[in-house]
Amino acid sequence: MTELGDRLRALSEEQRTYALRQLPRNLAEGGDHARLQRLLLDFDFLLAKVRALGTGPLEADLERALAILTDQERRALEILRHALRSGAPTLARESVQLASQLVGWLNPGISDGLDALLRVAHAWEEQAWLRPTPGSLAGELGTLVRAFVHPGGAVQTVALSADGQTALLGCDLGTISVWYIDDPRPPDIWHGIGPVTAAALSRDGTLAIWADGSVIRRWSARTDAAPTVIANSDGGFVAAALDASITKVILAHSTGSLLSLDLVAEGDDIFQADHAPVLAVAPDGGHAILLSPRSTAKPDLAAVEGLWGVHMAPTANNFFSVWHLHSGDDEECPYGTQVPGALLDVSGVARIWFVTDRGVSPWELSNVLSDPGTARLTSRPTCLALSHSAQWAIVGMNNGALRTACVFKDPGLVIRAHQGTWPVAVAISDDGRRAVAADRDGKVAAWELAEQPDERAVAWQKAAITGDGRVVVGWSEDFGLWMHDARRPGRPRKVEEEYVTSIALTPNGGRAAWASMQGWLRLCDLDRREEPRTVRVHIPLAVAFSPNGQRVVAGSLGSATAATDANESLGLVHVLDFETGRRETKEPLEIQGWITALAVSSIGVVLVGTRDHGLVLWEIGGPERPTQLADVEGWISAVGISPDGRRMIVGLRERTVLVFDRVGQVAKLLEVHTMSAPVVLAQLSDDGDVSLVGCEDGSVQLRAIGGGSAGFTATGRVISAAVDPRCPTRLACLDASGMLHELELRGNLTPS
Amino acid sequence: VPVGLELALLFLGKKVLDVVVGSLAKEGTDALRRRLLGDETQRALAAALGAAVAKYRESGLRLELAEPLLGKHGVLADDEVAAELGQLLSFEAEPHASALARRWRSAVPDAPDSVDFDEEAARLLQLIAAELRRSPQFRPVFDSRRLDAIASGQATSIGLLTDIEAELRNLSAMMTDGIGEMVSALGRAPQGVREHVRDATALLEDKTRGFVGRRFVFDALDSFLARTDSGYFFLRGDPGIGKSALAAQVTRERGCVHHFNVRAEGVNTAAAFLTNTCAQLIGAYGLPRSELPADVAEDGGTLGALLGEAAVSARGRDGVLVVVDAIDEADLASSRGGNPLFLPVSLPSGVHLLVTQRKTPVKMRVDGEAEAFDIDPTSPENRSDIIQYLEGVTARPEMQDILGAASITPGRFVKELANRSAGNFMYLRYVLPEIERGRYRGLDVSELPAGLDNYYEDHWRRLRGEDEDAWFKWRLPVLTALAVAESPVSAELVARLSGIDEVPRVRRVLADWQQFLHVGRQIFDEREVRTYSIYHASFREFLARKEEVADECVSLGEASRRAASAFSELFDD
């Protein structure tokens, strides 16, 4: 508790409420900058305000302060604002995570004020929490190359030359300008007759086309003449693109028509898409994404070569269709909400369907970009763009972050700069190094984007880690299976190419096992550094170790038999000796349902979770038949069992965690908890008294059974997490963006 | 002559007092019996009961639930219930809420499952007790917990009971308007949604009381709705022209999803708008959500999705109309450079937004249909509405008495006031009560200030002229403290913010400014306190303009410094 915090608590409730709500404003309007900064950098004030009013009013305080402070005074508050915005979704749910979010998002050494704030947050102990390593959420930030204010109003469009040197900006009051980023010469500025809603710049930056109001204009750097009108229309364009040869421009209209202008022959074609708003035009000018929310009929656009359409019908099952208009192929995709140039999943997962000249279908591309490698985004995109080559995508986020992805390589969208304000238009260069972003107030920033940190280069899709975070065995679609053992010299090694369905690691990191859809299970002794042993198993889906690492259980897909319904999945559970790879039971255990999770105790009690057939308990070699445990409705996505087989934990995709005690063959429900997202991981400590749960939204939670809990939220889906067996207050968490978080439990989980 | 609800309230008061008198022990003196059964006491009790029911009804989506309480055969008139109400005054035992709950439950058989009538009954009894304690007649009774301490000679004004009756009548009328259906639907929404709805019943009741005319605005709105598939209808006009009343009337008649920004009450952030609006959309259109997403207030993403879902749900009906009042009062910092309140740039098919604002432009991006409709204060349509409103006021018996005494014909009065108002309803809202209170002696209408600004100026000059010393020492500091507080504050806190040590003095100054203030109540440290805030933004702007005049010595910056220095103890420098 800071002194200011103590004094704040001593106020009456009305005075305290007023101080939290209005004092920053009074200090700002009264011109007391020093106290204003002290107040906004005081951890107890921040915590009290977030608890009482949420992060929004606190951000508004920071905005007000930033508007009046000098550049020198601003730096610390700008970084704090970024940290709060980044952590806002987490804090909206759990204000108690303020300390962990500040420590995770703030790097030390930036300013004395921030360092003091960080020290207090770091030492906070009012409640139990999981403390990350300082700055572990933040990563590297880009470098601001140039900042300027666009004349004439709010910027609506940004286009960039392929080399990132020339930027074209258009605003809502009709002003358009060309800026030369690394060149000190003044920009070229013209004034149109209406809002500039669509603009395109050629690869070399010498030809610009835009629509201001109802007029379409062209400007060439080569002639140095004023812009000329090349067409008149009824306005309402939303996107524009020039082809690589600069002979054709396509302008997309909000009502669904596409205007194709031949710049050489001065002819034009118009295609009408049945009132389907156009969301984006690909950089080559040959493709567009259309959105048709009303009509169920496909628009008649077959004449346009290579055009993709996206038809979104608001149906009960929330799906829409994508089809290639030329071939007539179509495909069903998940339904998302609309942002310019993309469709986004409402849950905040970036699912972006780019239409490019490679002819890759949006659905295929979405797999590359988002499923399941892309980090769950902690904020929502506000704008996006592709580079001329369509190799780089950039997305502006509502927390001010600029995320990029190399479209055909990176599985995730990585933060590479922080704009600070809400970006409304962005552009990126062909090499993915330079970006320009503009906000609503006309502030424009050119960024030299940060190099991707190494640890973010691989976005794991499946992984297992040790509790000290030093051993990672992980699989990513692009890079196959990699093993990294920080205890030994040498770089991570790649050991597998094929699709891996599940990975398990012993608590000490000495042994690993992984399974492939190709029909094998590999057992690898990391301590001995031997080649993995291969065991044939038909379509293994899940794999787990016994706590001592001697036994491996694997769940696989079986074939339907006379005893089972032909329409139902049959699951098989195999028990193997790690050393020999031999099966311990003559026949695998047959159970109904698709096996999704497995755990085995030291004494050979196996817990099997299925997608839709509940929970099965089986004692290996025991006299009893496997038991279907208490009705668990839903998709079991994770299970854990204590080494003595006494206590069990079950995680569901339906955001629920259940804890049972086993009494003979009966399970007695102890606790039920609702989580913030589908559960992906559930484990119990050696004594069974503490649970570790990880979720799709990046949250990890350590909870004493019957007691308190401590949480932390990473930037991406939890891929793996484990408690350090040598120090139960330390744990490691790997998220989908490749970030490894080393966490320390602060405070006591047991309620006083 | 009491009629309708007023009569029912008096009947109820009489019934409760009969119970109380019946329970008096032998030592109860005849004088006390007479006092209890006198008109004065009966009227005070009726007013307290009415005020409590009105307060209950205006909060927490209880518009429908409170419907069967009053009336001659209402829940409160039940013998058993009246007996429990009598306990509030006789102090023989704590009133038992269960009898009220039982009778109430049977009167609302189709109440939502989530309603706990025992809790509701306890809440209502608390409100009745609070209102009784507030009345001059019964305050001594509660202070001493002795019935014979009841004050005499404290007549409840006829106007008070009439006002309460009018408020209750207006609330009842809302049940048959579109808003009644909507409040009913919201009351049945899941708890995780319902708890985020900001109940605007009291605001709607206040803003629409005496509403007249505006046909020309409704016509323009309806034409826009018919002509467009979706879009923004911006209703613009000067401060006090009646934009909020119109937004409230549209909301009331059509049962729209609505959000009223009130800067003086701190209800002007994007977060407040998004949580309130999203919760209403889910509740009103029966969208399949049991709670609001945690990140609902992060940006407009959830709102956009819910508008789309609501439009699908409303297909085949009138579409979705959302009313957003006073966008110019929105805290722009809270929307971080996005549209004010994160209003969507584009609207889904079938969705329209009615947004009210000043004539000064609000920086906002809209892709799609948008129309701005300006209310011109000098237009014949606006003048006609002003006249219609004034004619309604002059028809009231109290006003006719005043006009008669001043020998002014209603026609002349209406014409003069219409001229003086310069087409501004807020002007009439200030001036007419003053006339009714006798502020303008002899009612020389030619002496009335012309226009809202002149009205403010007139009041300003008068208070300053009364006592220049008091003006600079107390009146101005109190007013500027309220201006920079930007939220409702108690007299104690005003004293602290303005640097005036004497709270009673501050209370007297607040009374001087009362007609420009909104008086509310809040609970702090488990104690209900009266709070004050500036009623209308136009007065705050008048004050800001005074900063430009050197002679006025108004400095809001200085007031902010003074307010901040009230918290110097937080800092150790």
Image (cartoon, coloured by chain):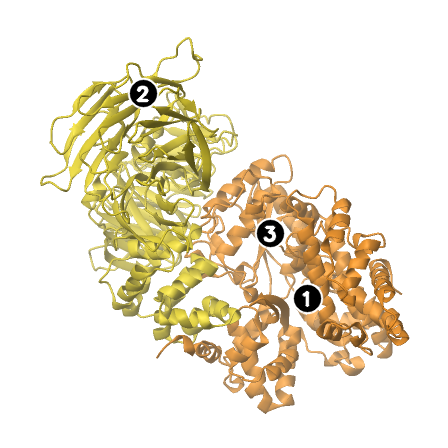
Chain colours: A yellow, B orange
Horizontally, residue B9 falls left or right of residue A265, namely right
Badge 1 density bin: few <14, some 14–19, many ≥20, Cα 10 Å:
many
**Label 3 is found on which chain of the structure?**
B
**Label 2 is found on which chain of the structure?**
A
Location of residue A308 (image quadrant): top left
Furthest toward the left, the residue is A489
B416 or A752: nearer the viewer: A752
Location of residue A77 (image quadrant): bottom left
Q: Secondary structure at mark 1?
A: helix
Q: Amino acid at mark 2?
A: Gly
Q: Position of residue A430 (x, y in %)?
A: 22, 42
Q: Amino acid at mark 3?
A: His
Label 3 – label 1 distance at C-alpha: 22 Å
Q: Where A731 falls versus B263 (above or below)? A: above
Q: In the rendered image, which residue does mark 3 sit on?
A: B258
Horizontally, residue A497 falls left or right of residue A421, namely left
Q: Where A494 falls versus B276 (above or below)? A: above
A718 or B525: nearer the viewer: B525
Label placed on residue B425:
1
Horizontally, residue A608 falls left or right of residue A458, namely right
Q: In the rendered image, which residue does mark 2 sit on?
A: A621
Q: Position of residue A504 (x, y in %)?
A: 25, 31
| Of marks 3 and 1, the one in the foreground | 3
